[in-house]
Image: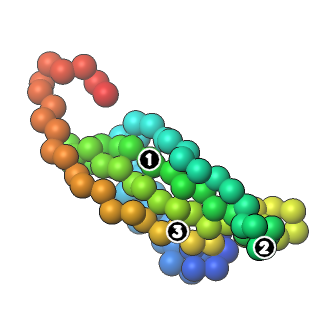
Amino acid sequence: VKTMRGPAAQNFNPLSAKQWAEQAQWQKLEVLNAHIDSQDSTKGYVEFKAYYFINNLQQCLHEISEFHLQNGQWYYVDGKTIKQKTQPVKINRNDPCS
């Protein structure tokens, strides 16, 4: 909450975000690209993929996040998700934990 501004902060519901995050089993994070806007050095972008399981489905959140620099601090202001296909994963009783 403290690092959000603009649309991200306006649309953020801390309770539902916490409930969703607690259901997810986070696997890994890949940062694909990060750069500062060549026209405006107070804007930056990070493209990432966050992998997780929820309801026995492996998911991937692929997003390009926009950040703005204000008073020496970067704030998350918006993100555009890139649609990914979900893949059902059967977890058997004696399988090792992921």
* Dot 3: element: strand
Quarter assignment of residue 69: bottom right
Gap between marks 1 and 3 measured at Cα? 13 Å
Q: Would you identify the image quadrant in which residue 84 lies? A: bottom left
Judging depth in this view, the residue of 55 and 46 nearest the camera is: 46
Mark 2: few, some, or many residues within 10 Å (few <14, many ≥20)? few
Q: CA distance from mark 3 to mark 2?
A: 18 Å
Q: Is residue 78 left or right of residue 93?
A: right
Q: Gap in Å between the C-alphas at discs 1 and 2? A: 27 Å
Q: Is residue 40 above or below residue 29?
A: below
Quadrant the C terminus occupies: top left
Q: Please give left or right for residue 56 compared with residue 20 in the image.
A: left
Give the labeled residue for mark 3: 79
Q: Position of residue 2 (x, y in %)?
A: 69, 64
**Which residue shows up at 12% across the image and 35% down it?**
90
Upstream in sequence: badge 3 or badge 2: 2
